[in-house]
Image: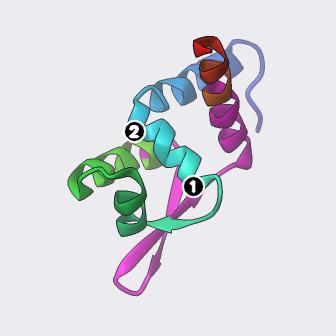
Amino acid sequence: MTATGYEAYEAAGALLRALSAPIRIAIVAELGSGERCVHDLVSQLGAPQPLVSQHLRVLRGAGVVRGVRRGREIAYSLVDEHIAHIVADAVSHARENRL
């Protein structure tokens, strides 16, 4: 069932809160180009593994990412490609305003 009226605004607010940390935006941006394991995200973002894992938990809890076990690792991907577009547009807008 889709959210209508005020419920849609509440859902959008929850999504934006989940994306409110810069590292979570960076994680979503990375996942926008395909699934990644934690060690890939750590390498790409230059952030400590516990920090990346903590933020992935927040994103999973918010329904932004999902994880699929692949042997000893979990491969993370975006639940919905719209989220990648939201983040890309926000980053693009922020860059435009700084020029």
Q: Does residue 64 show up?
A: no
Callout 1: SS: helix
Q: Quadrant of the C terminus?
A: top right
Residue type at mark 1 is Leu
Instruction: Residue under label 1, please give it.
Output: 31
Q: Earlier in the sequence, mark 2 or mark 1?
A: 2
Question: What span is in magenta?
Answer: 61-90
Front residue of this view, candidates 29 and 3 = 29
Asked if residue 17 lies left or right of residue 50, the reply is right
**Residue at the farthest bottom position:** 71
Q: Residues within 10 Å of mark 2 (few under 14, many from 20)?
A: some
Vertical relation: 27 (above or below) 66 = above
- Asked if residue 60 lies left or right of residue 99, the reply is left
Q: Considering the numbered disc 2 on the image, is that residue within a helix, a strand or a loop? A: helix
Q: Position of residue 40 (x, y in %)?
A: 42, 66
Q: Quadrant of residue 72?
A: bottom left
Q: Quadrant of the N terminus?
A: top right
Tally the marks: 2
Colour style of the rendered protein structure: rainbow
Residue 81 is left or right of residue 22, and the answer is right
Callout 2 amino acid: Ile
Q: Is residue 3 magenta?
A: no
Residue 50 placement (x, y as % from top left): 22, 54
Percent coordinates x, y for residue 18 in the rendering: 47, 32
Residue 88 inside the magenta-drawn segment: yes
Q: Residue at x 25, y 48 (%)?
A: 51
Local crowd size for mark 1, using a 10 Å CA cut-off: few (<14), some (14–19), many (≥20): many
Q: Label 2: which residue?
A: 23
Query: Which residue is depicted at the point 64% across and 26% down?
Result: 90
Work out which residue is located at the far front of the displayed protein and give it: 99
